[in-house]
Amino acid sequence: MKPIYKSVVVAVITTASLCISADALARDIYVNNQIGSDFLDGFSEDRGQGKIGPVKTITRALALARRGDNIVLANTGQSYQESISIQGARHNGLKKKPFLIVGNGATLDGTRTIKPEEWDIVGNAVFEMTPRETTRTLLYLDGKPATSVAVNKDATKVPELAPNQWCIYRGRIYFKCEEGKIPLDYELSLTDLQVGISIYNVRGLIISDLTIQGFRQDGINAHDNVFECELAELRVR
């Protein structure tokens, strides 16, 4: 019987070791778009000597990542302006440990800032500009979708706009400022990038506490072979 007991003990120890090893394999990769740099190693929240410190972009963190890792975003108050792709075995979870992207309330933003010189004055505090595309275009004011006014397809002129409202008419964007203000006085941006997060051929993924906004086509696009993935506390607009 002694050999049997010995085998049981060895089996228990081996199983425990495997569990510990799975957790130990998972690493934290830190992203900070204020103090980070994509030349740093990503394994520290704070800047240190040499290459110690957070990376600047989520794209770089994903390039460094392997199965079961945790990508931790710093909510700096400044949006992460990029489009990211999560795909393949390196972004899978481990058997008992998912691959995590922890947003901490940060924002992934697909907009571009409108330059002051892009605006032309129309009159009565209304300004106009020509976007590169009008399909699925939204105007953002102070980081949030501005109030739009629908335009009838048979309209022959720009509709009446209240201050801080906008519309698209004949391929141009029209925005009405408050009295005494011009577009330069506002934080105005447009949808630009196509997709916020593309997920493909991934198993065991959790993305949490993230705002995704300003993308022309989709905030999140899950393609083929996506299994056991969870989206928690996401705000898509």
Image: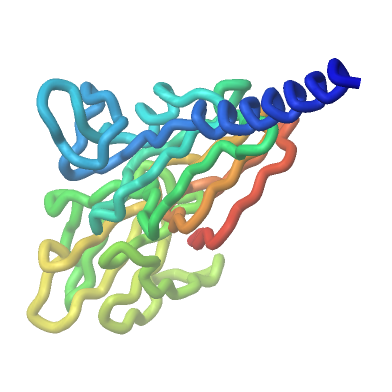
> In the image, residue 145 lies at what x, y percent?
39, 66
Please state if 189 lies on the left or on the right of 8 as rendered. Answer: left
Please state if 228 lies on the left or on the right of 3 as rendered. Answer: left
Is 105 drawn above or below residue 41 in the view shown?
Answer: below
Is 131 drawn above or below residue 105 in the view shown?
Answer: above
Please state if 208 lies on the left or on the right of 193 as rendered. Answer: right
Quadrant location of residue 149? bottom left
Total marks in image: 0
> In the image, residue 148 lies at what x, y percent?
42, 72
**Which residue reaches farthest right?**
1
The residue under the point 56% across, 22% down is 90
**Which residue reaches farthest front?**
2
| Quarter the N terminus occupies | top right
The residue under the point 20% across, 75% down is 177
Camera sees residue 200: no
Is 28 drawn above or below residue 80 in the view shown?
Answer: above
Is 183 drawn above or below residue 27 in the view shown?
Answer: below
> In the image, residue 153 lies at what x, y percent?
55, 66
Quadrant location of residue 40? top left
> In the image, residue 95 lies at what x, y percent?
69, 32
Residue nearest the viewer, comparing 193 with 136: 193
The residue under the point 54% across, 71% down is 152
Camera sees residue 141: yes
The residue under the point 20% across, 27% down is 52
Residue nearest the viewer, comparing 45 with 24: 24
Quadrant location of residue 116? bottom left
What coloring was used for the rendering? rainbow
Residue nearest the viewer, comparing 54 with 156: 54
